[in-house]
Image (cartoon, rainbow, N blue to C red):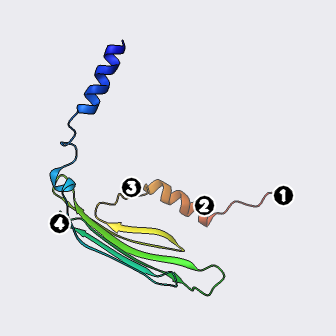
Amino acid sequence: MKFLIVSCLVAFAAADVSHIVGHSERDAKILKQDLDVGVEGQYQWVVETDNGISAQARGALNNPQAENPAQVVQGQAQWTSPEGEVVQFAYTADENGYQVQGSHVPTPPPVPEAIIRALEYIRAHPPKPEA
């Protein structure tokens, strides 16, 4: 039993996992990397690599003098999937939440017609308050 455990540990340590991480990902060089941070909460950063990955974002405080200032961030990212498709999305995050747009962002299915009719009926005929 001990021999089996030691054999497994040696096999795991000697395993070649280079096929899991592609060569272009492992050897990617950073072409551009910038970061600018201001004193009032504003910032901007950009990263680009030679294998097609790029991302950038900028943010600032909305109404910095207010009691509860909100951080506002806008950004985007892009890369190529293993299938060769370009994946690209843009986002905004603010006091209204995180909103993302892109062709690869999943969307919910449409609301069934029966549910829409039921909601319209309820809206037109609200229930009477209980006594």
Q: Residue at x 29, y 60 (%)?
A: 104
Q: Earlier in the sequence, mark 4 or mark 2?
A: 4
- Which residue is disc 1 drawn over? 131
| Chain-order first, disc 3 or disc 1 | 3
x 39%, y 58%: residue: 110
At label 3, counting other C-alpha atoms closer than 10 Å, the crowd grade (few under 14, some 14-19, many 20 or more) is few
**Farthest residue, direction right:** 131
Dot 3 or dot 4, earlier in sequence: 4
Judge left or right: residue 103 versus residue 85: right
Give the image location of residue 119, x and y in percent: 55, 60
Disc 4 element: loop
Label 4 sits on residue: 50
Report if the CB atoms under discs 1 and 4 are less than 8 Å apart. no
Q: Earlier in the sequence, mark 1 or mark 4?
A: 4
Instruction: Specify few, some or many for label 2: CA neighbours under 10 Å numbering under 14, 14-19, or 20 or more.
Output: few
- Which quarter of the picture shows residue 17? top left
Asked if disc 1 and disc 2 are in contact, CB closer than 8 Å, the reply is no
Which residue is drawn at the image coordinates 54% and 63% (left, top)? 120
Please give the residue where the numbered disc 2 appears in the rendered image. 122
Residue position for label 3: 109
